[in-house]
Image: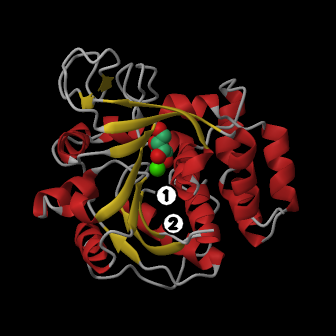
Amino acid sequence: MQKYKILIDTDPGVDDAMAILMAHDRADVLGLSVAAGNVGLNYTVANALKLVDVIGAQTPVYAGCATPLVHAAADAAAVHGSDGFGDTGYTPSTRKAQSEHAALAILRASHEHAGKLVLVALAPLTNVALALKLDPSLPQRVAKFVVMGGAVTGRGNYGTVPAEFNIGFDPEAAHVVFSSWPHFTLVDWEATVRHGLDFERFEAMLDKGDARAQFYASITQKTRAWSRERGRPKLLIADALAMAVALEPDIVLREEERHVAVELDGRLTRGATVVDWENRLGERANARIVLDVDQSRFEALLASAVGAR
Ligand code: BDR
Ligand code: CA
């Protein structure tokens, strides 16, 4: 299998955690550039460092933006725990984040691995937007850009009805990215809902895994309970789905090329990803929207990532 050079922009977060495990299992991970999102930056950075320890890797962690570009936004601690990792009281990593800012690390990696870099964004797009503003030529050096974000027919999970968390947390950043990145792959919340995981099967998989599985089981205990209490029929791990698409592009079974823009205003619609399904505006398609993937291959990647082979 081809080994990509992957840089992950992330806000761990329990579903980020699974995606990061998957990436380390299959690819060369150049670094984790970290944003605020699911919880505050102090927690997302600490969680990234801890997860790298659990993996037994030396992946550098770069702290990025602590707030959205313009407006403050509510976090997702209710889903991920107030520390973003299920409030387990884990022993923190003794390692520290690098001194380089996440946005600068993204730019540096794009130069060092020009044409080979796969950038996977699993967080609000604050760091990526900042990098783009610092250097608008960034997309020319990135081989592939995969974004977990949006709700492409308006069935969101955050704030206004149609907003999804990563876009709704920092719509201005998403606007900067979507309006200037020529072409990216979008894995949205609605695809995540279509690719939910059976709770019992997922937990049986964790039981068979190694130390990574044990750690993942502990940090997701609260999220799994929360999901069940809310009556969700399946466990949803959005960032893992996006990472599966980044790692194995041919896992995609159905996709559409469309123009996508971000709504910045609107009493009921701020943060919506507006997809021009009928090409009414005549704008060039900027997004490859992933609609369906091979579920069994997706689940095999998850199992492998936690050592449950
Ligand atoms: C996205 O929002 C965050 O809460 C998750 O980590 C994921 O990136 C799903 O909407
Ligand atoms: Ca995330």
Residue under numbered circle 1: 12
On screen, residue 78 above or below 228: below
Disc 1 CB within 8 Å of nearest ligand 2 atom: yes
- At label 2, the amino acid type is Asn
CB contact under 8 Å: marks 2 and 1: yes
Residue under numbered circle 2: 47
Residue at point 65%, 36% (across, down) = 226
Q: Is the image coloured rainbow, by chain, by secondary structure, or in one colour?
A: secondary structure
The image position of residue 259, as x and y in percent, is 28, 29
The secondary structure type at the circle numbered 2 is helix
Residue at point 29%, 20% (across, down) = 276
CA–CA distance in space, label 2 to label 1? 6 Å
On screen, residue 124 above or below 196: below
Identify which residue, 246 or 75, lies in the foreground.
246
Q: Earlier in the sequence, mark 2 or mark 1?
A: 1
Q: Is residue 186 left or right of residue 232?
A: left
The image position of residue 189, as x and y in percent, is 49, 33
Q: Is residue 194 visible?
A: yes
Identify which residue, 63 or 260, lies in the foreground.
260
The image position of residue 16, as x and y in percent, is 53, 55
Residue at point 34%, 47% (across, down) = 124
